[in-house]
Image (cartoon, rainbow, N blue to C red):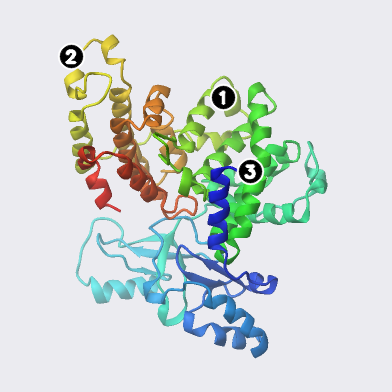
Amino acid sequence: MSDCDQTRSASIQAVQRIVPTPRQSQLLTYLPAYQVLICKECRYAIQPLAISRHLKELHGICRSDREGFMTYTRSLSLANPKDVPLPKYDTTPVPFLPTQRGFTCGLSGCDHLCVTIKRMKRHWAHTHNGVIINGARWHPVVLQTFFRGNQLRYFVVRGLASPSPIQPLIVNRAPLGSFSSWTLEDLDLLRHFRSSTCLDVSHSSESRRLWQTTIPEMACSYPFLKYGILALSALHLAYLRLPERGNYLLKAASYQSKALPLFCSSISNVDGDNCHPLVAFSRLLLIYCYASEEQDEKLVLARRGNRSELLDWLYIIRGSRNIFKDTWEYMLNGPLSPILQETMFPEHLAPVPENIEHSRRLNLLSAMPFAGMGNKSVSQTHALKSTELSQSPIPVALEALSNAFPKAQTAQSHSVYTVCIAVRIWPAQVYSDYLALLKKNDPAALILLAHYCVLLEPFESSWYMHSFRRRLLLRIYNQLDPEWRHWVQWLMERI
């Protein structure tokens, strides 16, 4: 067993806790990101001091049976309702909670939310009486709340326009294969993927439909895609069900270990048939890499002697670009076109005013010395010939990063900013020479990567990006020698 496997095994053993019984799992689910316990039947969070009463009065569970439930819930870290962190604005809906249409106050700086126009009018009469604003006094939004009653606190989530219902898996609908060979465990994980995991993978009703039906059908004929779906579903459940985390992490690792060799053998011969399942798996692989518990050890720059390991996700991004460059145009006209379109920055968007602070910080980087040019700064190389400048990829990577920031800001302002676009506008643009510098722990390369983390900040509410940015910044900061750390100090203060 390798050192990495031993570390992973130790980590899994460390997080194993009391495992709920099937009946407990059927009724309750724990969301560790928010430290709440959701009743899946009632579809709201139970207050920590009201769990026993809830089980007795609403579900008729007798005292002897409730004890098992209480033993399980006592092993969880549950926050008081007033201390539960709310998801960021316009995030993906929280699993197991209902969504409802509501309204947000249109006055700048007011965060009032409610579910009826009558209540919003009352809010304006009591709070903003006599205030005149340009535009509407309120706007429609989609709301959720963890708790009911006197602990009700709404938050805004991303609305799913024209949500497509999940179609039942019918064996004879799969022209290229059959679900009959899938085990019951496989089908349970697939069911979770189609009902929950894929909601964070897709960003439109069209792509969601593909992840729910078309891609699982493809997986019947391409085992690497099947195992990739099951691995990510298991990893998602490891995040959602902390008491069962160790079990699901092992399942995820097992499925992924089956998928990767098959994927690697297939990418050596990309053609018009397998390019579609290969690109679908590449998306799953990237998300798996973001979310994988192994990133605690392999995320970036984990010291092994005097060398350090590069981020797996950057390798995947660069590798995917090379693998599919010859078939990209063909795939854009294929069955997965809506998914590929999500990775492309919409150039037609009207630009927005620049973020002055971000521009200032990026401009400061032009004074940063870098290797390959006698430790000259980027600004000092402007007068050099292009042949001389090509000795280092840092100026090119910095220019690409400077272009990425306004694109990200524009996409955010139009509510179309996704992880796929964040990947497209910078990591997919940098050259392999820059990645080689990262592999050598080049300080200038690391500092650019640290600044890219700003563009990942909007995705922290997503289950697979949870704390990713923070961990990455900490690894970079610890890898830098003290004389370089002032370049990223402002980033560290943001976490």
- Measured as percent of width and height from the top left, residue 278 is found at 63, 32
Identified by mark 3, the residue type is Gln
Task: Name the one closer to the observer, 89 or 378.
Answer: 378
- Measured as percent of width and height from the top left, residue 304 is found at 44, 38
* Contact between labelled residues 2 and 3, with CB atoms less than 8 Å apart: no
Q: Residues within 10 Å of mark 1 (few under 14, many from 20)?
A: some
Task: Name the one closer to the observer, 11 or 129.
Answer: 11
Residue 374 shows in this picture: yes
50 w.r.t. 268: above or below: below
Residue 127's mark? Answer: none
- Measured in 3D between alpha carbons, the distance from the residue under mark 2 to the one under mark 1, in whole angstroms, is 36 Å
Residue 164 shows in this picture: no
Kind of element beneath mark 1 = helix
Q: Quadrant of residue 192?
A: bottom right
Residue tagged 2 = 383
Q: Residues within 10 Å of mark 3 (few under 14, many from 20)?
A: many
Kind of element beneath mark 2 = loop
- Measured in 3D between alpha carbons, the distance from the residue under mark 3 to the one under mark 2, in whole angstroms, is 49 Å
Please report whichever mark, 3 or 2, sits nearer to the chain's N-terminal start. Answer: 3
**What residue is rendered at 63% in x and 53% in y?**
250
Task: Name the one closer to the observer, 385 or 296.
Answer: 296
Kind of element beneath mark 3 = helix
Residue 256's mark? Answer: 3
- Front position among marks 1 and 3: 3
408 w.r.t. 370: above or below: below
Q: Residues within 10 Å of mark 2 (few under 14, many from 20)?
A: few
**What residue is rendered at 51% in x and 72% in y?**
76
Residue tagged 1 = 323
- Measured in 3D between alpha carbons, the distance from the residue under mark 1 to the one under mark 3, in whole angstroms, is 20 Å
